[in-house]
Image (cartoon, grey):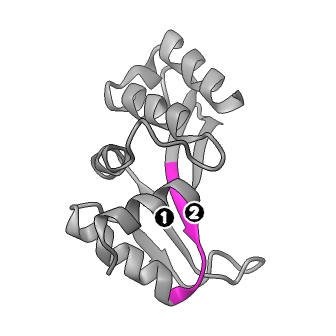
Amino acid sequence: MYTKENLVGILLSLPKLEINVIPDDSTRIGYRVRLRATFRGGSEMLQAIQRTLLQYDIESRYRDEEHKSRPRPILAVTGKKNLNPLCELVPDNLPDIRNEWGNFKEAVDLFDRNMQHTLTGLERIIELKSE
């Protein structure tokens, strides 16, 4: 298990933050937005991150093998109820390595308010993805 300070450092340096906009005919606007934070690394480290995230009521999914062409462990955090507290753990005044957290936090906020179902919200999410 990691301390909160260690977890903040891990969140600023390790995860890949993904904003995916996928065509989907079953939705009214024709697209589906998926947000997730993925961690890649050693099995023991990812399981320790997962246990630490559970202390903050953040559920994550650990898999020993991402898929056949990438047989390495992966930990993924998805869903509104998990991404909001994850974003709250990351302070706004600290820069991250890839400068992704600002855009990701805004996308999570739009997603939380269900703005991805509107044209203006979807356009903003696409802008955030391209930045």
> Tag on residue 14?
2
Quadrant location of the C terminus in the rendered image: top right
Residue displayed at 35% across by 63% down: 5
Instruction: Give residue 116's position: percent from left, percent from top.
Output: 46, 24
User: Is 82 left, or right, of 14 in this rendering?
Assistant: left
The image shows residue 98, relative to residue 15, as above or below, that is above
Look at the image and say whether residue 85 sits in the magenta stretch.
no
Classed neighbour count for the residue bearing mark 1: other residues with Cα under 10 Å, few (<14), some (14–19), many (≥20): some
Residue displayed at 64% across by 21% down: 127
User: Is 34 left, or right, of 7 in this rendering?
Assistant: right
User: Is 9 left, or right, of 55 in this rendering?
Assistant: right
Q: Nearer the viewer, residue 123 or 45?
A: 45
The magenta stretch spans which residues?
A: 36-43
Instruction: Give residue 60's position: percent from left, percent from top.
Output: 38, 66
Residue displayed at 39% across by 47% down: 90
Q: What's the amino acid at mark 1?
A: Ile
The image shows residue 23, relative to residue 125, as above or below, that is below
Give the spatial CA distance, label 1 vs label 2.
5 Å
Instruction: Give residue 65's position: percent from left, percent from top.
Output: 61, 82
* Residue at the spot of label 1: 10
Q: Nearer the viewer, residue 32 or 89?
A: 89
Q: Quadrant of residue 42?
A: bottom right
Q: What's the amino acid at mark 2?
A: Leu
Q: Quadrant of residue 74?
A: bottom right
